[in-house]
Amino acid sequence: MTQFRTLLNDLRRPGLLIRAARIGLSDYRRDRDLRRLIGLGGSEGPEATLPRLLAEEARLEAERTGGEAGYSLCRHIDILIALLAEMRLLPRDQTPA
């Protein structure tokens, strides 16, 4: 579980993208949005959804930084919203600090 947190913490994206994703968290509905974004319903745990979301986000980031004409800013924000929301569903580490 900590590997997902580490990967998400290591993402370096423009502040505007992250700010937009944080604002969109209030409208996130797991069952609806996961089906639309990656073809999964809401019955899978975050351990199953996070790898697919991370892969899709990496693809979108490559399109963004490469200046691809097919890049979708809206989809990128939607994926980031889902990533942030799914990370919140992971249990906290039980190891002492």
Image (spheres, rainbow, N blue to C red):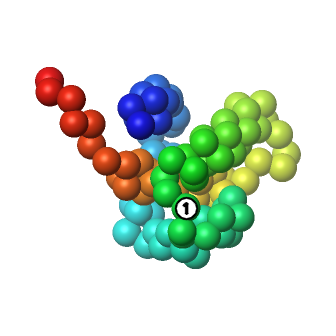
Q: Is residue 16 above or below residue 30?
A: above
**Residue beneath the point at 65% across and 69% down:** 35
Q: Is residue 93 above or below residue 47?
A: above
Whole-percent x, y for residue 50 in the image: 55, 46
Whole-percent x, y for residue 61 in the image: 67, 37
**Residue beneath the point at 73% across and 39% down:** 59
* Image quadrant occupied by the N terminus: top left
Q: Is residue 21 visible?
A: no
Q: Is residue 89 above or below residue 28?
A: above
Q: Quadrant of residue 33?
A: bottom right
* Image quadrant occupied by the C terminus: top left
Whole-percent x, y for residue 89 in the image: 37, 55
Secondary-structure class at tag 1: loop
Q: Is residue 4 left or right of residue 91?
A: right
Residue holding disc 1: 44
Q: Is residue 90 left or right of residue 74?
A: left
